Image (tube, rainbow, N blue to C red):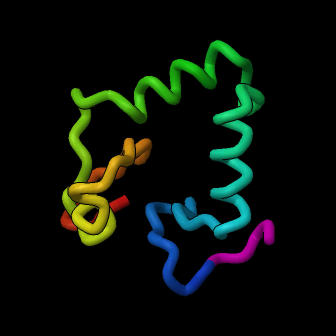
Amino acid sequence: MAGTTSATAIQWGNHSHGATVRQLLRYYLLLEQGRLVSPEASKTMRDIFASPDIPHVNDKFVKGLAGRDVQVLRKSRLVGGLVS
């Protein structure tokens, strides 16, 4: 809901970096369908997410996928010791 903040959302300034499962599913569905911004921008974003030049944070989620026939299209980063 707009204007609400999850108790687990990471805060920087007045910006919440938390998202609901529904928001994430909608984001990735529109991205995959080429409808997030435009077909060209969506392809560029998918290419960035898939790029081996930007390493994944090797957290429990990524470690759990090791040895499986999957391509991880997920990027996160460490900010002051926190993963975003």
- Residue 35 in the image: state x and y as whole percent: 77, 29
Seen at 41% across and 27% down, the residue is 48
Residue 39 relative to residue 17: left or right: right
- Residue 78 in the image: state x and y as whole percent: 24, 56
Name the main secondary structure of what is drawn in magenta.
loop
Q: Is residue 79 visible?
A: no
Residue 16: in magenta span: no
- Residue 70 in the image: state x and y as whole percent: 38, 47
Residue 52 relative to residue 22: left or right: left
Seen at 60% across and 80% down, the residue is 6
Seen at 55% across and 86% down, the residue is 7
Total labels drawn: 0
Which part of the image, by quadrant, shows the N terminus? bottom right
- Residue 57 in the image: state x and y as whole percent: 23, 54
Residue 4: in magenta span: yes
The magenta stretch is 1-5
Residue 55: image quadrant is top left
Residue 52: image quadrant is top left
Residue 54: image quadrant is top left
